[in-house]
Image: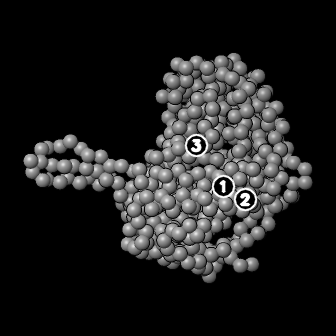
Amino acid sequence: MNAHQHFIGGTWTGSEATLPVVNPSHGQEMARIARGGAKEIDAAVKAGHAAMDGEWGRLDAASRGRLLLKLAELIRRDAEILAKMESEDVGKPITLARNDAQVCARYFEYYGGAADKVHGDTIPFQNGFTVMTVYEPHGVVGVIVPWNYPLQMTGRSVAPALAMGNAVVLKPAEDTSLSALHLAKLAAEAGFPAGSLNVVTGLGEEAGAALASHKGIHHISFTGSREVGTLIQTAAAKNTIPVTLELGGKSPQVVFADADLSEAGTVIVKAITQNAGQTCSAGSRVVIEDKIYDSFVADLAKRFKDLRVGSGEQDLDLGPVVNAKQCERVQGYIDLARRDGLTILAEGELGTNVPGDGYYVRPTLIGDVPPDHRLAQEEIFGPVLVAIRVRDEAEALKVANGTEYGLAAGIWTQDLGKALRLSKGIKSGQVFVNNYGAGGGVELPFGGVKGSGHGREKGFEALYGFGSMKMIAIKHGV
């Protein structure tokens, strides 16, 4: 079986060793990728520097924008190819994978339009001076993306990095590298200069670690676990370079008695089961006012019992988790709930004719979970929703803020004052009132506080993270 190669300096190149690509729907190897390490990362960084010193670095912002818009067109042209690839690689239902392909195209479209609109300022100063600010690219940036939304995450970080004029070295997750490699192929077709986008596949502890610590990298963007994020930030600190970190969450959905409970139930179930719960901002805790707790969890339980799990091509409510290790991890939390005597309120079911060797976890609703229990504190990253009972608004706020994370939160109430108080009081990077996720808008700044990381991706704000401000003061006399 021929292995998919790295894309470095506009050329496809392999490595001596390879890694298997396993389809999580049936647990079987379907391809192989090159296993890159320090050697390949060094070559990619050098290619990035050559691009910055050459054609890519000389392009004006409008020209960069046109290239991104062309790439968006090509992604839409190959959307079905990418969706099938993503579904097989990640295990997600094909409908969700099709949406991911369109969102990826939207990132390149959005930042293609924004590339020539990053404006500096003039600053009133002393007579005889003109003072201005301009934004410039960092240089060569490293982007490390996770395995849960490879297409979306690649677009989310790579598009603004390129729009700002940086050269990129991308290290996709070893479990899900195929769509990133196809995007590299499309970038070449779009006319991106050699070295402007490089893709090196391999293990996190090899290729990822080499990228994070490389002295030729000027910025790192990382999405993943807190543990690895700490290692990334430590490595970057040794080279004194900035880092954007998105490190997951334990996001609360706070539901009050005056909410539209039917709509809340629909959205809350989707927010924890989409992509088999493997979403950083998944609403994994539902914090419910006591007076409606019993009736609301009964409605959630009915919804959970109706959920069906299957392979990506079966296109059911959710697919498998990404690999055997993740399957064991998520199932371990469910087993812990049983050992600790927590109430399993409902579980979904496997669909018919589901492949026997796939990594399937039934979506699970667990009730009356103590706020300090591991299931209410730790990021499970699977289709497991824990329900927590609270007396009032004050306790709801305390519970919502009672984890080390702070990525997203949902508030369900018709009381505008309550919604505003909680929106300001909850410590998270995003707050949604009477919705959750706002459709995942590319335009909406995204990122966390506390243990969920720092820096912002998405929206116009992301462009500033991939650039640095320069102040220019000109003395010309009165």
Q: Position of residue 125 (x, y in %)?
A: 17, 43
Q: Is residue 128 above or below residue 179?
A: above
Residue carrying label 3: 441
Which of the two labelled residues, at mark 2 and mark 1, occupies the earlier sequence position?
2
The residue that label 2 is drawn on is 80
Secondary structure under tag 2 reads: helix
Q: Where is mark 1, residue-wise? A: 101
**Element assignment for label 3:** loop
SS at badge 1: helix
- The residue depicted at 66 percent of the width and 74 percent of the height is 4
Mark 3 nearby-residue class (10 Å; few <14, some 14–19, many ≥20): some
Q: What amino acid does circle 3 point to?
A: Gly
Q: Give yes or no for contact between labels 2 and 1 (Cβ–Cβ under 8 Å).
A: yes
Residue plotted at (71% across, 53% down):
98
Which is more foreground, mark 3 or mark 2? 2
Badge count: 3
- Mark 2 and mark 1: span between their CA atoms? 8 Å
In the rendered image, residue 386, in percent from the top left (x then y), is placed at 69, 36
